[in-house]
Amino acid sequence: MPKHHISLVVNGKKVEADVEPRMLLVHFIRDVLGLTGTHVGCDTTNCGACTVILDGKAVKSCSLFAVQADGKELLTIEGLAKDGQLHPIQQAFWEKHGLQCGYCTPGMIMTSYWFLRKNPNPTEEEIRNAISGNLCRCTGYVKIVEAIQYAAKLMQSKELKK
Amino acid sequence: MYPAPFEYFAPKSLDEAISLLEKYKEEAKVIAGGQSLTILMKLRLARPKYLIDLNKIPGLEYIIESNEGIKIGAMTRMNDIAENELIRKTYPIIHDAAINIADPLVRNMGTIGGNLCHGDPGNDMPSVMIALNAVYTVKGTRGERKIKAEDFYIDTFQTALEPDEILTEVFVAKPEPKNGSAYEKIKRRVGDFAVAAVGASISVDENLRIKKIGIALTSLGPKVLKVDTSGLIGSVANEDTFEKVGELSYKTAQPSSDIRGPAEYKRDMAKALTIRALRLSLNRILGK
C-alpha cells in the first residue's frame, strides 16, 4: 500500500513522516514519535487511556489513523508541562492523589484539559460525565474527581493572577 | 490491533468522493467519524480495500434552523448536537439520544451521518429520525435524492444507500406547537449500546388528542423498527393510550437473546420504554 506523507504539529513542534494508512494514531505517537505517555488500553474505544487533544478536542487515538491527523495540531501528555513546571491539572492529580497505578492518568488528564477549557467551573456531576469515557480500575474515581475539581480551582486562580 | 491493509483517500469535495465510490464500488468504504468502522476494521470484521475519508470535505458540518425545520449536515459531530441549545429545546428526543451515545470523547469524533448510515440496529439516531419523520438527502453519481428515514433501513448493516451514494444531510420538519418527544434507553453501563431503546414523538391538539405520533425501536430487532401507530390518531394522550402504544411496540419488537439480555426481557422493555418515552413527551408538552 502506498504510504502517505503527513505533516502535523505535535506539542508545538512540526513533525513530518511517511505512514502506512493503517497505522493508528496512537502507534504513530508511541512508536514513531517515541511519546509513550499516551497509553494503549482496550484498543476498542472503551477505556480512554489513549486520549489526546486533536485540534482542541479530546479524542481516542486508538480509533483514528495517523494519516487522518495530517495538517492538524496534536497535544499529548508530554506537551503539558512548561519549563519544568507541571500543568495545573498534573499538579492537582499529584497533590490530590488522583491515581494509583497511573495507567489511565494521561488519558484522564487530557480529557480534563479539554473539558476544563470548555467548562472552567464544573459541578461534580459534570466532571463525572466528562470522564465517562475514561476507565480507571484502581481508584473508584473519587480522588480523580477531587483532583479535577482542584485543578479547576488552580486554573481559575492562575487566570486571576494574569 | 491493526486493520488489514487498505488504500486511503481524503477527497476535498463531495464530487471527488462520489467518483472514488463509483470507481471502487463495494470494495470501498466511506469513513466519517470512524468510531464504529475503525474498530470493526481493527477487529478485521470489516476489510475495505479502499477507505474514503469525508473529514477533509468542507461544508458538511452544520446545524441550520429555518421556518421549515432543522437541517443537520452529515459530518456534524455528536457532541455539537448534544450541546446545541435549539435542539435541546425544540427536538428534545435528539438531545436525549445524543447525550447517551458512547462517551464525550467518542462524540467528539462520531458524526450523525455515521450513526445514521452504519446500519447497526443498536445505533440510536435512526430511531430518533424515524420517530421524527426525518428525511435524508443523499448524493451519488446520478445526482441527489431524498429518502424518508423509515425507508432507509433495509436489514442489519444494510441501508437504502447505493454503493456510489453518500448521505449529506438530515432534515427534520419544525414540530407542531404542541409537540413533545423523548428517547428512553436502557444500557448496562455508561457508554454501552442499548439493551433496548425507544424514540417517541407526539403532537396533540388543545384537547390532548393525538394528531401525529411516531415510535421507533432501537436494539429490538435485526434493524431499527418503526411501530405502526396510525390506529391511535385521535386518541387522547393519556396512560390508557400509552399502554396501547406500548402493546404495539411489544408486538413489533423482534429482539434476540444475547449478552445484553434475553429476548423476553427486551420485549417487555419495548413496552415499558414506549410508555416512559410517551409519558415524558406528554410532560414536555405540558411543561412539567
Image (spheres, helix red, strand yellow):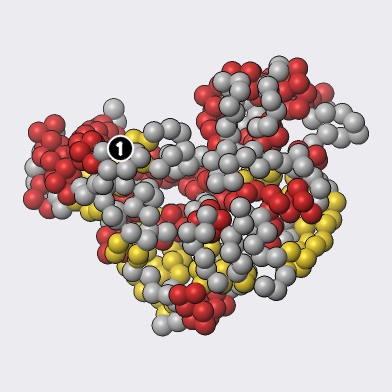
Q: Nearer the viewer, residue B116 or A45?
A: A45
Residue B133 visible to an observer of this rendering: yes
Judged from this view, the residue extending furthest toward the right is A83
Spot occupied by residue B119 in the image (x, y as percentages of width and height): 37, 59
The reply, left or right, for residue B250 in relation to residue B20 is: left
Residue drawn at 8 percent across, 50 percent down: B231
Spot occupied by residue B180 in the image (x, y as percentages of width and height): 27, 41
SS state under label 1: loop
Q: Nearer the viewer, residue A6 or B215?
A: A6
Quarter of the image for the C terminus of chain A: give it: top right
The reply, left or right, for residue B87 in relation to residue A161 is: left
Spot occupied by residue A153 in the image (x, y as percentages of width and height): 70, 20
Residue B183 visible to an observer of this rendering: no
Residue drawn at 53 percent across, 63 percent down: B31
Give the residue type at disc 1: Gly
Residue pointed to by mark 1: B261
Write down the quadrant of residue A39 in the picture: top right
- Total numbered badges shown on the rendered structure: 1
Residue drawn at 86 percent across, 35 percent down: A82
